Amino acid sequence: TGVGRTTLAMARERDLPPVLARVGGGHAVPFVAELTVAAVVIVLLLTSNVLTVVGFSSFGVLVYYAVTNAAAFTLPERAWHAPRWLNVLGFAGCLVLAATLPVASVSVMAALLAAGVVVRRLVLRRRGAAGA
């Protein structure tokens, strides 16, 4: 469900096709995004090893949490129970755990992440040129 909501948010920001931003029902469920994510997961499960798919998911979550810890480190005001060293420990812990995942999962997901960063930069450059 979290991936579907992230997909919805990215579609609303025009980082993914707008059709993925469609919602329905009284609770504004992103049904197109959820069905798309479900289809991708089903295809992955049918075409690869379940442990590899779990590794993909784990890598993605750990990178997400590492980024969250890095972002939290930059907060100027903090609660007493959230010292900066805890963000450093969380960041490092996420990266260490990600590195212990199956090599296939790490390499494929790292390549996808790198490709996503490149595509994002290209999209932003194109939008900047179109708006100028």
Image: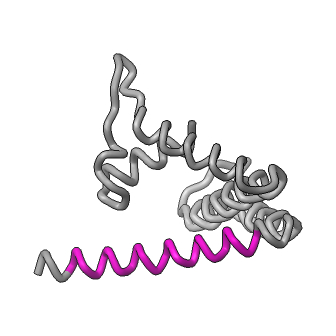
Image height check: is 78 above or below 117? above
> For this view, does 28 lie left or right of residue 91?
left
Closer-to-camera residue (130/34): 34
**Which image quarter: residue 14?**
bottom left
Q: Is residue 120 magenta?
A: yes
Q: Is residue 62 magenta?
A: no
Identify the residue at image location x=80%, y=65%: 98
> For this view, does 38 lie left or right of residue 33?
right
What predominant SS class does the magenta segment belong to?
A: helix
Image height check: is 100 above or below 13? below
Closer-to-camera residue (69/29): 29
x and y percentages locating residue 16 in the rendered image: 37, 57
Identify the residue at image location x=25%, y=79%: 126
Image height check: is 117 above or below 61? below
x and y percentages locating residue 20 in the rendered image: 36, 45
Closer-to-camera residue (61/36): 36
Identify the residue at image location x=83%, y=71%: 99
The range drawn in magenta is 106-128
**Which image quarter: residue 42?**
top right
Placement of the C terminus among the 4 image quadrants: bottom left
x and y percentages locating residue 3 in the rendered image: 55, 45
x and y percentages locating residue 128 in the rendered image: 21, 79
Q: How many marks?
A: 0
Identify the coloring: one colour
| Residue at the extreme front of the image, as rendered | 47
Identify the residue at image location x=31%, y=75%: 124
